[in-house]
Image (tube, rainbow, N blue to C red):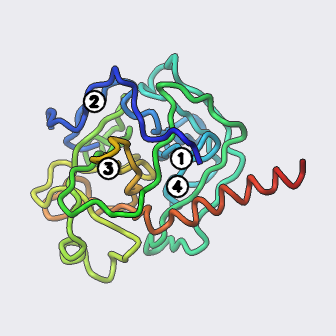
């Protein structure tokens, strides 16, 4: 995987600072989400995704279909100077993804050619061993609906959401619905959340020691958007780090053998 990951341009302000209060989010500074990918079907936003390597995007398994991948995107109403449009070579949904329960809701998208890395296009880091503690502030971003069943956003929207205890998540949404491959983040008071169109996008945690941004969750499902007592549910990426790396490495091995 990429040697340099999870770093943002020094010119981008620190978005972990509180900002005006995705649903309840605020526009992100251009360049502040260089790993965010806009997955499109026939030119329209279908899902978000996250660049984890120059040729690989992680997204939610429930998203995939005929996709075009746009990296470096900020404003979807116009062509940004930093965006790169790449076709999808193949989609690898997790073999144990359950479309009814959304368990193991993760997929890898292989691009037809590698992206050109820049300040506006950089992979995120996969999780390092330790899970962030409950209550840790994370960031979620995407072009999804600004309110339930509402229009999608034109520019990247972001919001800060805390990680919730698994017990709180299960009691809020149903212990049989929330599995160990899922996690919750958000506010039980409601008002700030991911929404339709944000699926597949990242829940990011900034490591306090290295300062690098790690992919902690993939936006998966929820009961409404920003509803009281209904936090957002995310695929727990740490449960799939080995699978992600194995899939990417296996493709590298195929190339090496052919050569």
Q: Name the spot of residue 107 as percent of width and height, x first.
A: 56, 59
Q: Name the spot of residue 97 as percent of width and height, x first.
A: 54, 71
Say which mark, if any, is on residue 27: 2
Instruction: State the separation of the CA atoms marked 3 and 2.
Output: 19 Å
Q: Report the residue marked by disc 3.
A: 205
Q: Earlier in the sequence, mark 1 or mark 3?
A: 1
- Which SS class for mark 3? strand
Assess whether mark 1 and mark 2 are in contact (beta carbons under 8 angstroms).
Answer: no
Q: Report the residue marked by disc 4.
A: 63
Between disc 2 and disc 1, the foreground one is: 1
Say above or below: 207 vs 14.
below
Q: Crowding near pointer 1: few (<14 within 10 Å), some, many (20+)?
A: many
Between disc 2 and disc 4, the foreground one is: 2
Q: Crowding near pointer 3: few (<14 within 10 Å), some, many (20+)?
A: many
Instruction: State the separation of the CA atoms marked 2 and 4.
Output: 24 Å
Q: Earlier in the sequence, mark 4 or mark 1?
A: 1
């Amino acid at each position: 995987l990429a040697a340099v990951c999870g770093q943002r341009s020094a010119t981008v302000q620190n978005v972990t600072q509180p900002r005006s209060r995705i649903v309840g989010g605020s526009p992100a500074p251009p360049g502040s989400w260089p790993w965010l990918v806009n997955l499109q079907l026939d030119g329209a936003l279908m899902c978000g995704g996250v660049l984890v390597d120059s040729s690989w995007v992680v997204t939610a398994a429930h998203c995939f279909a005929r996709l075009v991948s746009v990296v470096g995107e900020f404003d979807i109403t116009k062509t940004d100077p930093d965006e790169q449009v790449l076709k999808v070579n193949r989609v690898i949904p997790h073999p144990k993804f359950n479309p009814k329960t959304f368990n193991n809701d993760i997929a890898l998208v292989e691009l037809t050619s590698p992206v050109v890395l820049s300040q506006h296009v950089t992979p995120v880091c996969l999780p390092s061993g330790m899970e962030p503690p409950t209550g840790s502030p994370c960031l979620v971003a995407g072009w999804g609906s600004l309110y339930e069943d509402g229009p999608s956003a034109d520019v990247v929207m972001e919001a800060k959401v805390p990680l919730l205890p698994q017990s709180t998540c299960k009691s809020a949404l149903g212990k049989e619905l929330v599995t160990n491959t899922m996690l919750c983040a958000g506010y039980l008071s409601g008002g700030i959340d991911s929404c339709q169109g944000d699926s597949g996008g990242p829940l990011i945690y900034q490591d306090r020691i290295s300062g690098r941004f790690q992919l902690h969750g993939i936006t998966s499902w929820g009961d409404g958007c920003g509803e009281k007592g209904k936090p957002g549910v995310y695929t727990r990426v740490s449960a799939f780090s080995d699978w992600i790396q194995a899939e990417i490495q296996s493709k590298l091995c195929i190339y090496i053998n052919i050569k």
